[in-house]
Image (cartoon, grey):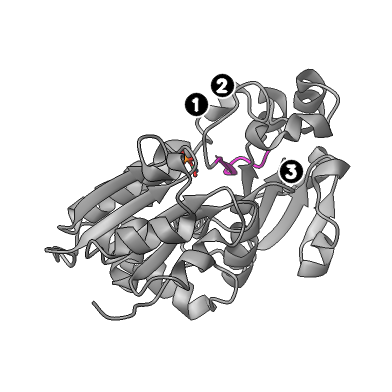
Amino acid sequence: MSASRHLLGIEGLGRSELEALLSRAQQYREGHVGGRHLVGRVVANVFYEPSTRTRASFEVAAAGLGAHVLNWSVSGSSASKGETLVDTAKNIAALGVSIIVVRHQSSGAAALVASSVSCAVVNAGDGQHEHPSQALLDAFTLWRRWGSLEGRRVAVVGDVLHSRVARSNLHALKALGANLIFCGPPTMLPVGLAELGVEVTTSLDAALAGADAVMMLRIQREREAEALFPSAWEYHRRWGLTSERAASLKADAVVLHPGPVNRGLELAPDVADGQRSLILEQVENGVAVRKAILEAVS
Ligand code: CP
């Protein structure tokens, strides 16, 4: 097994590289690619944090490419006896694994794994750093709908501070030509965000005005985000996408959310399930995007 490429983040990828991945994902999505590029290979999902969408999506994508999938989690493994991340990764790689898909609560964990093993590594979310496959599927969902993201206005709303999805989307959507406006409580907007070439506001109504897409971010309760605003009621009233606010959007504006949704907190249930919502389309598109990613790093 030779040293391989990795996907550790979106930062640093150029527009042409992103568009190549989106084009390949489109071929998978439309069923134009029959290739089972990973027959005889093993893909290991190594998840230190809970996941529904990302882990299952990588599993379905890898199986669709013909790979055997090894699903590893902390519970029941020797990590619960104190084995380190690097030792765990090296031992999994020694089983003959071709690609390790890793999620970890620490920023930089995927890069650490990549520097420790000779197989390919895909970052499935590292702390507050990046979640590249999520950003790619978000971009793909908008790209399929619009044809191009050039000049489109995308509002990214909520717990930006803790969000690896927001960080990866900043790089991906900007590289693809979208105009971004980030919005949230002042306590959830990282210092220096505006210097990254995006608009920043604490006013949700200002963020929504003229938006072609609204990406609502999850309040990350496991990272104690609720300490950063007075109450759930207050948050929903000021920064939640309510039915009334959704009704004020442009007629063809769409709503995205990476999941899992805190219903009634960042997103009203009828908006999550409504006509504008692309949430399940995002999940559906994720399989094709992850096939393109696995193929690219293999
Ligand atoms: N969007 C996302 O990462 O969801 P999961 O935590 O369920 O994988």
Q: Are marks 2 and 1 in contact (CB under 8 Å)?
A: yes
Q: Is residue 60 left or right of residue 143?
A: left
Amino acid under disc 1? Asp
Residue 287 visible in the snapshot: no
Amino acid under disc 2? Asp
Magenta stretch encompasses residue 251: yes
User: Where does the image place residue 214, in percent across and percent down from the top left?
Assistant: 64, 44
> Which of the labelled discs sits on residue 37, or is there none?
none
Residue 167 visible in the snapshot: yes
SS at mark 1? loop
User: Where does the image place residue 71, in percent across and percent down from the top left?
Assistant: 30, 45
Please state, as top left, top right, bottom left or bottom right, where the N terminus lies in the image. Answer: bottom left
User: Where does the image place residue 285, in percent across and percent down from the top left?
Assistant: 37, 50
Residue at the image point whose x is 35% and y is 35% from the top:
76
Q: Is residue 47 left or right of residue 166?
A: left
Kindly give the residue lying farthest to the front in the view shown: 81
Who is closer to the viewer here, 224 or 194? 224
Magenta highlight range: 249-257
Label 1 belongs to which residue?
273
Please state, as top left, top right, bottom left or bottom right, where the C terminus lies in the image. Answer: bottom left
Label 2 belongs to which residue?
270
Label 3 belongs to which residue?
208
Q: Is residue 67 left or right of residue 249?
A: left
Q: Is mark 1 within 8 Å of ligand 1?
A: no
Amino acid under disc 3? Leu
SS at mark 3? helix
Separation of residues labelled 2 and 3 (CA atoms): 18 Å
Dot 3: within a 10 Å radius of its alpha carbon, few (fewer than 14), some, or many (20 or more) residues? Answer: many
Magenta stretch, main secondary structure, is loop
